[in-house]
Amino acid sequence: MTMAEVVAHVRKQALACEELGSPLYAVLLDRLADDLEIGGPGAQLVAGHEGDPGPSALALRLMGGVHRLVLQRRAPSLAMFYPSVGGRGAPDEAWPAFRGVLADHVVELRRRLDQAPQTNEVGRASALMGGLQHLASARPGPFGSSRSAPARG
């Protein structure tokens, strides 16, 4: 991919995040695409990855690296926007903190780009199937019901 193709990939991922109900990632990825076009910190991070194939999820690998920093409490200014750590900030206000994290953690985030994210939601959910089937056979009735199971006798 050329840098223009990377920008298009990031914008496509932003739209997918919007459609999937992740407004934070949608906004951040859209602004990241703008940053790539002007040669900002995001462009420094992805430099050398322009040749990565589209299915390698370059945008998600970058977002995963940033999220890891948030989870490790190493990006406190950004954490206030991430629901996974209790943040509730407005997505439109998150960009300056996100851009700062990109600039402050270039070396580490570049290393993270070499690690593929787990993006197969169906594959992750399939591990629950066996346990749910066991629960369904052990206790008939709907899951999450406040009613107790019928007495067996």
Image: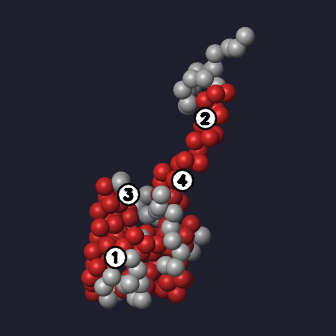
Q: Earlier in the sequence, mark 4 or mark 3?
A: 3
Q: Earlier in the sequence, mark 2 or mark 4?
A: 4
Residue at numbered disc 2 = 133
Task: Identify whether 126 is placed above or below 7.
Answer: above
Q: Secondary structure at mark 4?
A: helix
Q: Residues within 10 Å of mark 4 (few under 14, many from 20)?
A: few
State the image coordinates of residue 44 (x, y, percent, origin top left): 40, 88
Q: For mark 2, does the 10 Å Cα neighbourhood hold few (<14), some (14 to 19), or many (20 or more) residues?
A: few
Residue position marked by numbered label 1 in the rendering: 32
Secondary structure under tag 2 reads: helix
**Colour mode?**
secondary structure
Residue density around tag 3, few if under 14, some if 14–19, many if 20 or more, within 10 Å = some
Instruction: Give the residue drawn at x 63%, y 40%.
Output: 131
Task: Tell which of 137 and 77 is nearer to you.
Answer: 137
Mark 1 or 2, nearer chain start: 1
Q: For the residue carrying disc 1, how many other residues have a C-alpha within 10 Å: few (<14), some (14-19), or many (20+)?
A: many
**Inter-mark Cα distance, 4 to 1:** 28 Å
